[in-house]
Amino acid sequence: MPFRPRYTGLINKYRDRLPIHDDTRLISLGEGNTPLIRLSNIPRELGKDVDIYVKYEGLNPTGSFKDRGMTMAVTKAVEAGSKAVICASTGNTSASAAAYAARAGITAFVLIPEGKIALGKLAQAMIHGAVVLQIRGNFDEGMQLVKEVGENTPVTIVNSINPFRLQGQKTAAFEIVEELERAPDFHCLPVGNAGNITAHWMGYSEYFEHGIVNSRPKMLGYQAAGSAPFMRGAMVDNPDTVATAIRIGHPQSWDKAWKVNKESQGWFDECTDEEILAAQKLLTEKEGVFCEPASATSLAGAMRDIRSGKIPEGSTIVCTLTGHGLKDPDTAISQCTEGVITVDAKLGPVREAIVSNLS
Ligand code: F0G
């Protein structure tokens, strides 16, 4: 019987393309290798001849794309002898840092904005044993503090300003190219700090420069309307959105993302909270894929641009779904107007409820 080699994470798979030594101790949880799911019902509903794929990054070990960068950042921190990592986070980075630090046997310090991170993410940081500092302020203020603390404290910053993070995250583009056997025409991402859009472009460009593909996608970055510095052309001081993961007004990769935008001839746009939540719900109801609100921003933007023809028919489009829907159960439940049906534990009422709901 033919056995395939066990998948052991993205560093092992792409070690030739990553700054890693043969004897480096890898801190891995088997991240990467996430499904690229071809949508069937949504394109039909749009009435357009387009191929839409979603890259379901919510299926990484801690439920978000952050694990791709974190395996690299924590591996390199440990290699350099670091005993602690630190990050500011809207939730997912802190969950990932906490898990990989636990795996490595080092300490994670995480700064999160009080009251503005989704429940699942908070649970993750806490259960993995991170030192959780809840700040009376937003992500941008937390990020500034982390940079200042990092200057004279023996802790390694594992936000995406750590270059190893982007190295790990670029592997998502490799996986997409390998599955499609080409680069997509458009790649849509939700944008917060803009590290991920930068990392994807690095990955596509690397494969392009090495002749593995003969084109690169236009990179489309979608922001939440209340947190859209790339649309305003300036930093936003009081960002707000239901998509708490991308509630960021001072993106750390500002210059890099503008460069991506220019080089790829892509664009930025913004989606309202209503559009974001509608896209999240559509994806769950029509395709069976559950992502968190921020992640649905990529699909919300793509659908709008497909409808308007800005993304032309005949295109192959990839939308990154950055985080799992289970991260934010509160927002999911608050969207479900039908609620649940409570009945006595008796055959009669149960059957009646079923029969009256059969379509
Ligand atoms: N989607 C999700 C689910 C995120 O958690 C983030 C960022 C983004 C998109 C945006 O990615 O910053 O590379 O443009 N979350 C960070 C965090 C800020 O702390 O978890 P980006």
Image: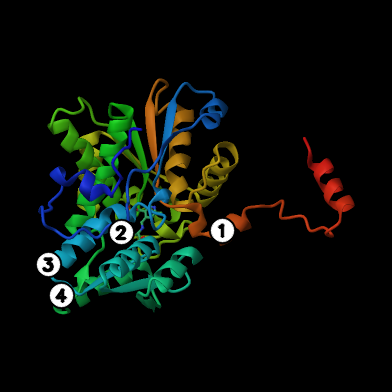
Helix, strand or loop status at disc 4: helix
Provide the residue designation for mark 1: 331
Q: Nearer the observer, disc 4 or disc 3?
A: 3
| Ligand 1 falls in quadrant | bottom left
Asked if residue 244 shows in the view, the reply is yes
Residue nearest the viewer, comparing 331 with 68: 68
Q: Quadrant of the C terminus?
A: top right
Looking at the image, is mark 3 or mark 1 earlier in the sequence? 3
Mark closer to the observer (4, 2): 4
In the image, what residue occupies the spot 30% across and 64% down?
Answer: 100
Mark 4 lies within 8 Å of ligand 1 (Cβ measured): no
The CA span between labels 1 and 2 is 27 Å
Tell me the number on the disc at residue 151.
4
Residue under the point 20% across and 44% down:
14
Q: CA distance from mark 3 to mark 1?
A: 40 Å
State the image quarter where residue 305 is shown. Answer: top left
Q: Earlier in the sequence, mark 4 or mark 3?
A: 3
Please give the name of the residue rendered at 54% of the width and 23% of the height, measured from the top-left corner.
Answer: 47
Please identify, in this view, whether the residue under mark 3 or under mark 1 is nearer the observer: 3
**Looking at the image, is mark 2 or mark 3 earlier in the sequence?**
3
Q: Position of residue 197 (x, y in %)?
A: 29, 46
Q: Are marks 3 and 1 in contact (CB under 8 Å)?
A: no
> How busy is the neighbourhood of tag 2: few (under 14 within 10 Å), some, or many (20 plus)?
some
Reading the image, the residue beneath label 2 is 235
Residue type beneath disc 1: Thr
Q: Is residue 345 left or right of residue 295?
A: right
Residue in the picture at 17% in, 67% down: 78
